[in-house]
């Protein structure tokens, strides 16, 4: 039983590696990174850069934890005229520029204007960028396959109550996501879009857990299905919620930083951190 699970876990790595293979379908025979790099997705919604020095603006911030990076500050300096601004030389966190829940929209820099308001805008944009729809569908298919496999393995581990093992799988999974999304806006947007989507594997996830549904206004709805024996009730959680709800130990939160520039994902993760980690 355990042997079998170990084999499955190592087969995940093969699956991750096989991600690049789909680009052999590309008649131009470009390798996948250069192909996707040619897709220029307009500015990110949120800067989300990891920073150790930061700027606070008492007039623009929505609470005292909000900060922006030096680049964003310099680009938006004009907008903070007559504002009370301070420089913080010792802090850790992510730049909030572009997140209307953290910063006044009038104080955003020119790069982070929240160019995409919702997922369907991102999806439409990506659809327009890919002239080769076969390739795009292949990417979607492969990402689905990877997400599904990772998730089914996590479910299997959960039954065995091996917390360090699920931590290991999630870390590997996010390392893979970080690797493919590094310097690649197009793919990063696709991954972010998937992480906040409802992920019920065509009803394969039974409702015997607490569903947490976060709507577009970031209101949270808890649905406790533990006592619910209605087998027709299916889970409405997003993939990121499902991942957060696995019992894991010592997960490095830096693993998630690359995906925080997506406004919806950033806010979903903030809520999930509060529910599961703090
Ligand atoms: Zn910034
Ligand atoms: Zn900015
Ligand atoms: Zn300001
Ligand atoms: Zn659920």
Image: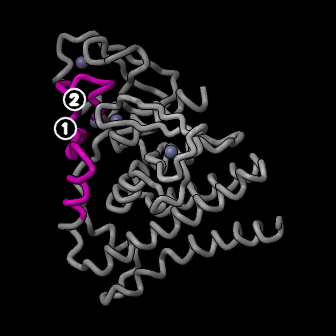
Q: Which residue is mark 2?
A: 76
Residue at 41% across / 51% down in the picture?
Answer: 198
Q: Secondary structure at mark 2?
A: helix
Q: Above or below — where is 249 with respect to 64?
A: below
Q: For the residues labelled 1 and 2, say whether their Cβ atoms are less than 8 Å apart.
A: yes
In magenta segment, residue 244: no
Q: Quadrant of residue 23?
A: bottom left
Q: Above or below — where is 249 with respect to 87?
A: below
Horizontal side, residue 207 vs residue 100: left or right:
right
- Secondary structure mainly formed by the magenta segment: loop
Q: Is mark 2 within 8 Å of ligand 2?
A: yes
Horizontal side, residue 213 vs residue 60: left or right:
right
- Give the mark nearer the N terminus: 1 vs 2: 2
Q: Above or below — where is 183 with respect to 260?
A: below
Residue at 75% across / 72% down in the picture?
Answer: 7
What is the distance, in whole Å, between disc 1 and disc 2 at their CAs? Answer: 7 Å
In magenta segment, residue 119: yes
Q: Which residue is mark 1?
A: 110
Task: Specify start and end residues of the magenta stretch as a single range.
Answer: 97-126
Q: Quadrant of the image for the N terminus?
A: bottom right
Instruction: Point out residue 8 in the picture as x, y percentages from the top left corner.
Output: 70, 70
Instruction: Point out residue 104 in the picture as x, y percentages from the top left corner.
Output: 23, 22
Q: Above or below — where is 48 with respect to 173?
A: above
Q: Is mark 1 within 8 Å of ligand 2?
A: yes
């Amino acid at each position: 039983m355990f042997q079998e699970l170990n084999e499955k876990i190592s087969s995940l790595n093969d699956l991750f590696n096989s991600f690049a293979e789909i680009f052999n379908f590309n008649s131009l025979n470009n390798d996948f990174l250069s192909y996707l790099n040619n897709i220029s997705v307009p500015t990110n919604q949120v800067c989300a850069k990891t920073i150790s020095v930061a700027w606070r603006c008492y007039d623009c911030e929505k609470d005292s934890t909000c900060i922006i990076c030096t680049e964003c500050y310099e680009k938006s300096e004009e907008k903070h005229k007559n504002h009370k601004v301070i420089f913080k030389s010792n802090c850790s966190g992510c730049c909030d520029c572009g997140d209307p829940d953290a910063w006044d929209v009038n104080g955003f820099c020119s790069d982070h204007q929240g160019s995409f308001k919702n997922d369907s805008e991102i999806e439409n944009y990506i659809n327009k960028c890919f002239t080769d729809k076969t390739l795009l569908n292949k990417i979607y298919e492969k990402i689905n396959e990877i997400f599904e496999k990772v998730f089914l393995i996590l479910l299997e581990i959960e039954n065995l109550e091996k917390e360090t093992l699920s931590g290991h799988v999630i870390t590997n999974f996010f390392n893979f996501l970080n690797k493919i999304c590094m310097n690649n806006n197009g793919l990063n947007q696709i991954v972010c879009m998937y992480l906040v989507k409802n992920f019920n594997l065509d009803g394969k996830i039974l409702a015997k857990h607490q569903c947490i549904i976060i709507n577009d206004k970031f209101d949270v709805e808890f649905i406790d299905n533990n006592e619910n024996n209605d087998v027709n009730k299916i889970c409405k959680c997003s993939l990121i919620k499902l991942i957060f709800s696995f019992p894991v130990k010592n997960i490095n939160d830096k693993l998630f930083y690359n995906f925080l520039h997506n406004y919806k994902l950033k806010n979903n993760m903030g809520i999930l951190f509060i529910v599961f980690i703090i």
